[in-house]
Image (tube, coloured by chain):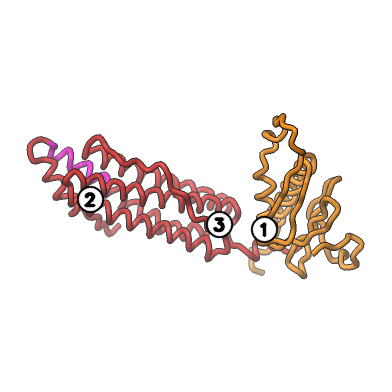
Chain colours: A red, B orange
Amino acid sequence: MKDLIRVRSLISAEVEMLLNQQVKKEAYSSSIYLSMASWCNRNGFDYSSDYFFKQAEEERQHQLKFYKYILDMGGNAVSPEVTGIKQEYNSFREVFEEALDQEISVTQSIKNIYARCLKEQDFVTNEFLNWFLKEQREEEYKARRALELFEVIGEEGTGRWQIDKHVGDIKYNSEA
Amino acid sequence: MVTTLIDPQTSTWVDVFSTKQGAVYQSDAERCWYVDFAGKVAKFDYRCLLKLKKAVYNVDIEAKLLETSKDPDVEIIFICACDHTYILTLMQIIALKELMEGTFVMLQLNSILQDRLYRIAV
């Protein structure tokens, strides 16, 4: 008996489902960053607002990368519904704390897909995910560095203004 | 397309899974499956078979069992962009779900076997 499902699709139903969940997660990330950009802008943190606009765009690109991969492999990519986006934050610092939490949860979720692919010996998807693993190093570094600014600069006096000015300069250029 | 089981080409069909209530056959030549259930044999391609599975799995059997209303115990399994519709009772839904579960386990097993047998280049 021919393996007709394999003929149509490179990825298994399980991996396809996980990838679709990831599409949703990236879409959610993108929306949450957009909401953070709005909050920062409303509260006078314009540089941070620009930083989050850029992050939102990046997450959108990640979402499309997963989306197109699913389709290219013969799967069914599902356009996600995104709801429950937090619009208000209690403090400038809270915004960055939540940004880091979001990045950590994305890393965990990609690790989870990677583990599943290893189990199934789906090396093709593993190879595809390698790019994201590397990307997450940068994303987590940037989010962590932003929070570090709160420690080293301090929020007193013109502290928040200084932090805001430096957020846009955060770069990750490791050769490793 | 609805055919009867006595059709001569059934000899080329391979049994995938069967229960007392129905059966699923695979046709390698036509790259499709034939689902023999509820008095008809219906042809499904890959996309439609997945949609059928999803539609059947989405029926909340427990909720239906607990429902006390006097509505007729009938469920319509309608699959978008597919020629077939099933109008089934709850017992038939349970039977169809069992058939689908078994079918997909067998197809997955076939995938694993094919992978293990043919992956190593000779």
Which labelled disc corresponds to residue A49? 2
Instruction: Confirm whether circles 2 and 1 share one chain.
Output: no
> Disc 1 marks which residue?
B116
* Number of residues whose C-alpha sits closer than 10 Å to that of mark 3, classed few (under 14), some (14–19) or many (20 or more): some
A154 magenta-colored? yes
Instruction: Confirm whether circles 1 and 3 share one chain.
Output: no
For the point 14% across and 41% down, the residue is A160
* Number of residues whose C-alpha sits closer than 10 Å to that of mark 2, classed few (under 14), some (14–19) or many (20 or more): many
Q: Which of A120 and A34 is in front in this view?
A: A34
Q: As shown in the figure, which amino acid type bears the numbered disc 2?
A: Ser
> Disc 3 marks which residue?
A122
Q: How far apart are marks 2 and 1 (CA)?
A: 52 Å
Q: Which of A17 and A39 is in front in this view?
A: A39
First to last magenta residue range: A142-155
* Number of residues whose C-alpha sits closer than 10 Å to that of mark 1, classed few (under 14), some (14–19) or many (20 or more): few
Subunit bearing disc 3 = A
The answer to whether the residues at label 1 and label 3 have Cβ atoms under 8 Å apart is no
Q: Position of residue A128 (x, y in %)?
A: 46, 60
Q: Position of residue B61 (x, y in %)?
A: 70, 37
For the point 48% across and 52% down, the residue is A80
